[in-house]
Amino acid sequence: MLHATVVDSENRPVTGLDKTAFTVYEDGKPQTIRAFKTEDVPVALGIVIDNSGSMRTIRPSVNRAAINLVKASQPRDGVFIVNFGDDSYLDQDFTSDIGKLQQALTRIDNRGTTAIYDALVASAKHLEKNVKSDKKILLLITDGADNASRESLNEALQQLQQKNGPIIYAIALPGGVAQDPKSHRDLEALTRETGGSAFYPETPQDVDTISQTLARDIRTQYTINYRPTTNRGAGIYHAIQVVATGPTGKLQVRTRTGYYGGQDMNEANAAPVAPATPSTNN
């Protein structure tokens, strides 16, 4: 199951394409598209937010943007909030209640370490274990580079790229990720290889505009289903390429670049997110 965003040369979304506009390749071999949808489908969304002390001054802008993204959701969507530092905390499980989500977003911690990879893997495991939605999305918001994860980037990617794993979007606020070349490359890999994208706002106020772009991106995706014809043995990586052609020629397609066969996220070696943190962390 692939969820694909199609844009033109100006990065504008392209809608209205039909099944014949798409060709799917797995390991270089063309695949038969069995099902194709253009309608909006229910979304399971995890908002994964760095709650270290450095986020305190910009957190109000981040919270407003997160709530605006939630308000753009549909009634059948489910949203959960994970706040993380060196550990990850599920401060609100799946809900569409804006009040509960706002309360979870107010929790700030003073710890300075940032375990991005661990938080994403744990959140992906929570998505896989708790929902049946075909479209699973994680939105990471951070101002720092990973400096505390037990998982390496490659280990995290292998778990995030399990069959029907989540699409990862990221908002990297001014700070460690945006300024450190290695962290920038790592974040690009996490988002690009799962079919998402990374955004780098210049100011906290820009985050709200980005949340509107994300909402549009999520709601205008094409859903493509195919049954692989290649060897699907456990642990084997399969590269995916999707090509789309419109009236003006070849278009840019954002979707996952591959997956590891034979294992789902809830079977993977990932620590779960901890229960909600007490309100004394506010």
Image (cartoon, rainbow, N blue to C red):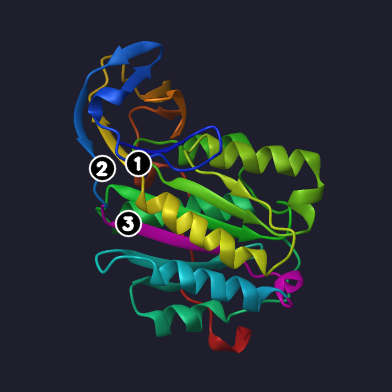
Q: Which residue is mark 3?
A: 43
Between label 1 and label 3, give the one nearer the viewer: 1
Q: What's under tag 2, amino acid-wise?
A: Thr
Q: Tell me how far mark 3 sits from mark 2, CA to CA.
A: 14 Å
Q: Residue furthest top?
A: 29
Q: What's under tag 3, amino acid-wise?
A: Val
Q: Position of residue 65 (x, y in %)?
A: 55, 70
Q: Quadrant of the N terminus?
A: top left
Q: Which mark is residue 15?
A: 1
Say which element carries label 2.
loop
Q: Position of residue 139 (x, y in %)?
A: 51, 56
Q: What's under tag 1, amino acid-wise?
A: Thr
* Figure quadrant of residue 260: top left
Q: Tell me how far mark 1 sits from mark 2, CA to CA.
A: 8 Å
Between label 1 and label 2, give the one nearer the viewer: 1
Q: Is residue 215 above or below residue 193?
A: below
